[in-house]
Amino acid sequence: MLTGFRYRLALTNEQTGRCEEYGDICRAVWNIALDQRRQAVQRWRRGYDQPFCGYHLQAAQLAEAKREETWLKAAPSHILQQTLTDLDRACRDHGTFHVRWRAKGRWKPSYRFPDAKQIIVERLGRRWGRVKLPKLGWVRFRWSRAPKGVVRSATVSWDGAHWYVSLLCEDGECTPKTHTAPDSAVGVDRGVAVAVATSDGDLFDRVFQSPKEHERERRLRRRLSRQRTGSANRARTKVALSRLTGRVRARRADFAAQTAHVLCEKNAVVVLEKLNTAGMTRSAKGTAGAPGHNVRQKAGLNRAILAKGWHGFKLACVNKARHTGTRIMEVNPAYTSQTCVECQHVDPASRESQSRFRCTGCGHTAHADVNAAQNTLMRGWTSPSG
């Protein structure tokens, strides 16, 4: 199976400039190709004969443009082709007019080198290694762990205040056909007060951002809003903010990976609630004619949901399940927090507080999130696919 290994790069000043230049070129190719696709769709809707504007047409046009435009020649051809591949996949999955532009101030550079024959990895010592990439040459990185298997591709990205390389390797392992504990199962409830609660009664949570870090982020965002666009001070503030939020994201990803490891190692089936996180965190602001209700309260709930990383935890479970043979199920989450697991009585008043559940029908008491996780597990067993 394919496994990713991520390392922090130690670039020279010249290599840093090249990486930034490659990112700008990839962003320009993405925006130009997206604009071309949107114009093609608009002409087709108006009744004009318009050939399908897909990857193959744009790749041929890119090859022709590289012979004429000097600025395109600076970047390796493979990463530009991969940019068109990613755009084609995004347009097919989400629709051409739902794919976002890559704005200079919002997009974090990321590009992929797909040719494994041009990628060479060597270890230099206990803490350092190096990788050879097209047009970048040998690049040193922190050897935090050894990559396993054969390298298939390399992705260079900017995250926080540092450049990273992710090596996608074929490790030769296969997903087990059966789990070591085939009769075990667990239901999971994702919450705001407690990140993860299980039907076994376990509660998993972690503080991703300390109060001092939260205050510092608030001050940095206030300072950023008052600084002039394009100024050197604004650039330094953005770097400081990226470093702070990058540490928070790393803690959240680490928590999701460790929790998913514990659950998938112990259970052959993990039942999750089928949550539309993107829809749940949509703003409550209405249109010009309908201003919306409880906008500030909804914004606070959205931040709390995103801070717990619900979607990231699901992806971590899916990734870990490949190594353990665990089956990941998703069930309808409706009324799981209002239903008594003992008598199936549904009443919003049964949830007395964020953590306490007391059934108004039979008097059963339990932790509210654990009760919801037990209902999730029960629905997993009774679902048609369970």
Image (spheres, grey):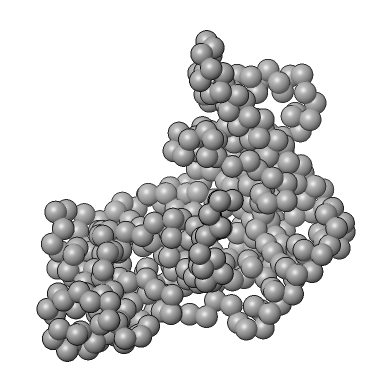
Which residue is painted at 46% across and 39% down in the image?
A: 94
Which residue is painted at 51% across and 20% down in the image?
A: 45
Q: Quadrant of residue 81?
A: top right
Apparent side of residue 232 relative to residue 11 in the rendered image (left or right):
right
Which residue is painted at 16% across and 53% down in the image?
A: 385
Residue situated furthest front in the rendering: 289
Instruction: Residue 275 in the image: state x and y as whole percent.
Output: 36, 60
Q: Quadrant of residue 92?
A: top left
Apparent side of residue 47 relative to residue 177 in the rendered image (left or right):
right
Foreground of the two, 46 or 62: 46
Instruction: Residue 170 in the image: state x and y as whole percent.
Output: 43, 47
> Where 106 sits versus 81, above or below?
below
Q: Quadrant of the C terminus?
A: bottom left
Foreground of the two, 85 or 143: 85
Residue situated furthest right in the rendering: 232
Which residue is painted at 56% across and 58% down in the image?
A: 291
Instruction: Residue 3 in the image: state x and y as whole percent.
Output: 44, 53
Instruction: Residue 288 in the image: state x and y as whole percent.
Output: 59, 51
> Where 1 sits versus 314, above or below?
above
> Where 245 sits versus 90, above or below?
below
Is residue 328 visible to us here? no
Is residue 247 visible to us here? yes
Apparent side of residue 21 relative to residue 272 in the rendered image (left or right):
right
Foreground of the two, 171 or 96: 96
Residue situated furthest top in the rendering: 49
Q: How many numbered circles are shown?
A: 0
Apparent side of residue 100 relative to residue 316 in the rendered image (left or right):
right
> Where 147 sits versus 59, above or below?
below
